[in-house]
Amino acid sequence: MTPIVNPPRLAARLLRHVLVPLALTWLAGTAVSAGIAYYFTQRAFDRSLLDDAALIAANVQPRGGGLELTLTTREVNRVLFDQVETTYFSVKQADGTPVAGVRDLQLSPPQGAAAHRFQDVVMHGQRLRGVVLRHNEPVPFDVVVAETTLGRRAAFQRLVWFSLAPQLVLLLVLGWWLHRAIRNDLRPLAQLQEALGRRSANDLAAIHLEATTRDVGTLVAALNALFARLERSVRAQREFAGNVAHELRTPLAGIRALADYGLSQNDPQSWREQLERIATSQARASRLVDQLLDLALALEAEAGLKLEPVSLDGLVRDAVLRFLPRADAAGVDLGAVGIDTPCTVRADPTLVDGILTNLLDNALRYGAAAEGQASTVTVSIDHRPGEVVLSVQDNGPGLPGELQAQLVHRGAQGQLGQLLGQGAGLGLALVSQYATLMDAQMTLGTGPNGRGWLCAIHFKEGVAH
């Protein structure tokens, strides 16, 4: 598509779209008004002509077997006097014999039973408007009266002018008022353009603009929503980059230290031990990268996530079956409670599966019971008034209450890392983020008798079915 070189301004286009149809409507109305004015002007003047013809006919009397006009020339001039027009008349018998008046004034007689007939005629180079009035008493005769049309035209022109002039003034006033109103209504768009032009690429703050119309307010709201989504996306990218830099520094440094130590040894057994440790550290780093990617995708999905009814009991059953081989290999009794009753919640199946995967992975990784006790991990679905609670519980060493809140911090190390035997990683941070995206709440606690660890996801009232 070829772009428009100089597109018109919105105010000019709106004004044109309003005034052009209005002007065309005004012209059409003016033409109709002019037609009506012409019609009634003609009717008025024709009526005057007919009255003059009737007055002359009333003074035609029979005399000596013929007809005679009883009015004198002075009286006729007084009857037909007009300051503007020149009036002619003629009285003729039925056979065309002149009785009085202008002999050259010839008009067609009325047709049929009509008593009079109006028509235009040209006489001696003059355009005349005339009427033929037929009388049958005492003998048939015709009276013809015709006059010039100067007065008619002048009256018609005055009517048209006095009709058009006020409308033209009103149209000009309306155009000025519309231009002013459109400019005022579009001023917020100019302010919006100015505000956006002053912004830097990193400024994604909401725009505060006083909207004079609902459309401008909707546009500003849409832009602010777009800025909010862009800000979340940029923040997610920055957090992802920061997490990668922070989280991978420790495992990569450990791998480098193990490699340097192995290279300094000459004993093949030491090399093997260091290679095994490097493989373990690499597995941890790989898992950390996967978690970082999942966390970044979760932050990206925040804007366009759509929740739908999902079968929670089916997702729990699939997750337990998927982790059973790993639990058996580790000697952990993995089970599920409450999955025999169908349970549907409004959520995202991928996020729910991510929650189960991270919670079961953490439970099998950190939830080993003390020596002499059997390790258990239980996934349960609990129906409570107004909510459905999904929980994963183990009977491992657990954590003190003051340290549990730190588990949701990404990459928690230090005292938590020492208690868990390795970094807390990003698993619970992912679970917390996933729960927030689904409008659910994550709580942490301990198992029976203060032993073990419990993580529960509370789906709010109205979500479960």
Image (cartoon, rainbow, N blue to C red):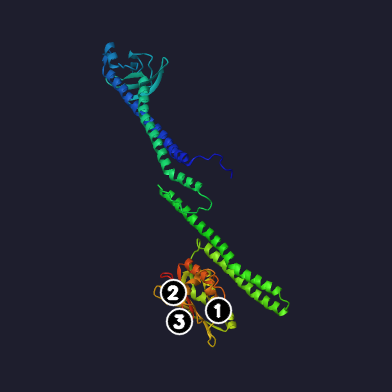
Residue on which disc 2 sits: 388
Q: Earlier in the sequence, mark 3 or mark 1?
A: 1
| Location of the C terminus (image quadrant) | bottom left
Q: Is residue 377 above or below residue 221?
A: below
Residue on which disc 3 sits: 450
Residue pictured at 44% horizontal, 74% vertical: 388
CA separation, marks 2 and 1? 24 Å
Q: Nearer the viewer, mark 2 or mark 1?
A: 1
Q: Position of residue 445 (x, y in %)?
A: 46, 77
Q: Is residue 128 above or below residue 430?
A: above
Residue pictured at 52% horizontal, 63% vertical: 299
Q: Position of residue 372 (x, y in %)?
A: 54, 88
Given the image, on which type of amino acid does mark 3 rest?
Gly
CA separation, marks 3 and 2? 24 Å
Q: Earlier in the sequence, mark 3 or mark 2?
A: 2
Q: Is residue 130 above or below residue 346?
A: above
Q: Badge 3 local density, few (<14 within 10 Å), some, or many (20+)?
A: some
Q: Nearer the viewer, mark 3 or mark 1?
A: 3
